[in-house]
Amino acid sequence: MVLNPRKINTFCFFKLPAAWWTGVRVQYMDESKAVVTVKHRWVNQNPFKSLFWAVQGMAAELATAAMVMNGIKESGKNISMLVANNNANFSKKATGLITFSCLDGHLVEEAITNTIATGEGQTLWMKSVGVNQEGVVVSTFNFEWTLKLRD
């Protein structure tokens, strides 16, 4: 494993300060799974006293992005990554500690392998599910990542 939660969280401090200051943190990651948490606090709440949807989005995206970043790093190739589309569903008020998990690491490996083999850009959809401390799903995000070899 090239990247780890500590390295990703340090990256967030310097490159994604909005995520850092609102409490988004990578807790675990490997080749197949990433787990990101964020706790509802005054600084990241909406007027309805729950976690602001954009903060949930940052945590959900980071759960997918961490694996894409790691896969690119492990490949040793110069590959760009960009979110082309996303959608979300909010099913319960998000309060307390929210944990976003993505289990789509196998899709990352396949897309990077195809990008390198063909030289053509690849797209992949990754899902990140947020649950509260009781295990109830509060939101589900889907991100369409595009990967392309850089010259």
Image (cartoon, grey):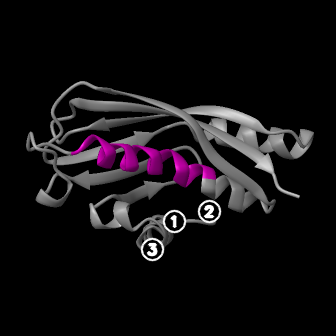
Query: What amino acid type is highlighted by mark number 3?
Result: Thr
Please name the residue shown 78% across and 46% down the image.
148
Within-10-Å neighbours for mark 1: few <14, some 14–19, many 20+: some
- Mark 1 touches mark 2? (CB < 8 Å): yes
The spot of residue 105 in percent (x, y) is 59, 41
Please name the residue shown 27% across and 61% down the image.
22
Tell me, for residue 10, which label it has, or none: 3
Segment colored magenta = 52-68
Query: What amino acid type is highlighted by mark number 2?
Result: Met
Q: Is residue 4 left or right of residue 107?
A: left
Pick the residue in front: 54 or 129.
54
Within-10-Å neighbours for mark 3: few <14, some 14–19, many 20+: some
Please name the residue shown 67% across and 53% down the image.
71
Earlier in the chain: of badge 3 and badge 1, it is 1
Q: CA distance from mark 1 to mark 2?
A: 7 Å
Q: Is residue 45 left or right of residue 151?
A: left
SS assignment at label 2: loop
Quarter-wise, where is residue 118 in the image?
top right
- The vertical placement of 29 against 146, above or below, is below
Q: Which residue is mark 1?
A: 4
Q: Main secondary structure of the magenta part?
A: helix
Location of the N terminus by quadrant is bottom right
Q: Nearer the viewer, mark 3 or mark 1?
A: 3
Query: What amino acid type is highlighted by mark number 1?
Result: Asn
Q: CA distance from mark 3 to mark 1?
A: 10 Å
Pick the residue in front: 56 or 18.
18
Q: Which residue is mark 2?
A: 1
Quarter-wise, where is residue 26 in the image?
bottom left
Does the stretch in magenta take in 67?
yes
Please name the residue shown 49% across and 66% down the image.
8
